[in-house]
Amino acid sequence: MTNVLLVTPAGKDPQRAVGATIEIAKQHGGTLVVLAVIDPSVPTYAASTLTDLAFMGEEVTERVSDTIAREYRTCASTLLQAVAERAKKEGVDVTPIIEQGDTGEICRRVIRTHQIGIAVLVAEKRSWFARFLSHSAAGHLPALSGCEVRVMEED
Amino acid sequence: MAHEYEVVVDRRPLWVILLGRSQQTGVVIVGALLYWLIVSVHLPGDITPQGQKALGAFALCVFYWVLNALPLMVTSLLAIILLPLSGVIPSNQAYALFGNEAVFFILGAFILAACLMKSGLSTRIALSMLHRFGHTPRRLLLSIFLLNVVMAFFMSEHAVAAMNFPIVVEIVSVLGLARQRSNYARALFLAMAWGSSIGGIATLLGGARAPLALGILREATGASYSFLEWTLLALPLVLVLLVGGYQIILRFFPIEIDTVQAADTALNERWLKLGRASFEEWAIGLVMVATFIAWLIGGEEFGLANIAIAAVVLLFVLRVVSWRDIERYVNWGVVLMYGGAIALGAAINKSGAAGWLAHMTISQWASSGVMVVLLTSLVSILLTEAMSHSAVVALLMPVSIGVAHEFGLDARVMAPIVAIPAGLAFTLPIGTPANAIAFSSGYLRIRDLLIPGALLELLAWVSFNLLAYWYWPLLGVHIQTR
């Protein structure tokens, strides 16, 4: 029995990866752990433009960043609910997790604590230049996680 | 128990990592070298040693503003110390420019906007408009667009976008619209972002760039515009962009839903929860209306800043706002940013550096007054997509005054030619906080802003120049050479 992890950025709807992961979990008879990660830099960026460029006070910036964070959380929760229902129909148990922070760090912790054997990462579509310049969990996790990692592009 | 350590290996090339970590320091050092180079080398043409030092300070600040090497207001502070230390203007003159009327007008406008937000009056106005008119998808979209446009006539466009953002998020959420797939969601966020930018150019309250341009103009020439004059100059462009922007949104994002019943119900519930307007809201609303009328009819006689500050004092007398509230809504960096920018503008104008810079740049490329207007507005509208609106005004306004002298244009005409296009950023998330907020929602992709935004930008630039050529002379503002 092997537990399977699906990691997706919050706010995405990776139907193809969900289907593939449920299939893997079914084949291995393990639990499907679905992890939606909220990138904290998104609400922070919007708030910082209001502080730095628009000279708004903290009440305004907090309102905007809270709204964005809440929206991402709601979106992640809707996705996890849909995955849980779909997996249940296929007879697969699901553990949903929503976390905010660095994807790589959170993944390694979840892989360890849930004894994951196979992890499926949903990679956001980005240009080769963006991939070259920026840090990517999908890029470095396979070598470090201690489990089999498969990367799938978002739909 | 042995402690387990996490090891994270960054697999990017070493030079990329080093570049990323030393980028800011590098920009600061390059800026300092740029300053040293400009004040040390022999420049062609007729420039005084004082002008050369002012030019160095100007180049350094623009460099830092463009590349965000330091927070905008800290760069402004740097300008304030650099000018007296390099002997361009004495310390007492440099610091006195912080007390410029434009700075206090901007401050007063920010405080009044803070009162509108804090009391909940701005939310009440938004909800009352949306729950009354937004019963169909098309009408709801138009209501959001119009709401943002009109509200930005009275308060900072950034505050309008920030305030209406949670309402738009709630609408798309209750309608269950898919992220990055729903045309209607994209249309709503664009209507919010573009609406606030379009409305922000209409009056001196929509953003700080217009008062900043007037502050630099007044310091250099003693001339200015009244509140009403400015509004009359800008309003036709607002109407053109209102129609054009709405059509572009509908063409690029055809509405795919038939009903907004769920949003209607949610807005109605929120509206009912607000209950009756409080004394605080009534008082702030009345003071705001009275202030606006005073700016329109008595702005020249009593001074825009005096009226703004009097309104703020009146709100405290009525005990409808506390200082603690104001502090939570206004970022005091605003005073430093605009005080520093005005001081820098005054220094490069008085030292002759602006004239030299104008002679070396726009004057080389333009052959007539009309060409100057076309080029200046084009540079302004392009720069504002990548840098702060106010930084664009701080960069272009002193140079434009120099260009106006060179071409025999009325320097007064350069304020709207720089400041109005500087508020029109429609294509990139970094262009303006309203775009950044809309993009951060996760419902828009870059290309949703880029292509329709570029079209609106083109429409804005063409319409602006046509209006400047044909309509402004009717108001006594001529872009033709005297």
Image (cartoon, rainbow, N blue to C red):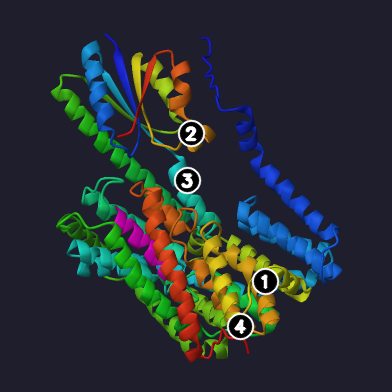
Would you name the residue on which mark 1 appears? B399
Q: Chain of mark 4?
A: B
Q: Main secondary structure of the magenta part?
A: helix
Q: Nearer the viewer, mark 3 or mark 2?
A: 2
Q: Residue at x 54, y 64 (%)?
A: B389
Q: CA distance from mark 1 to mark 3?
A: 35 Å
From the top left corner, tell me how far across and down residue B41 is, in percent: 85, 58
| Labelled disc at residue A44 | 3
User: Is residue A153 one of those drawn in magenta?
Assistant: no
| Labelled disc at residue A131 | 2
Q: Secondary structure at mark 3?
A: helix
Q: CA distance from mark 3 to mark 4?
A: 40 Å
Q: CA distance from mark 1 to mark 2?
A: 40 Å
Q: Is residue B400 left or right of residue B174?
A: right
Q: Amino acid at mark 2?
A: Arg
Q: Is residue B167 visible?
A: no
Q: Is residue B340 left or right of residue B429?
A: right
| Labelled disc at residue B412 | 4
For marks 1 and 4 on the same chain, the one whose residue lies earlier in the sequence? 1
Q: Secondary structure at mark 2?
A: helix
Q: Nearer the viewer, mark 4 or mark 2?
A: 2
Q: Residues within 10 Å of mark 4 (few under 14, many from 20)?
A: many
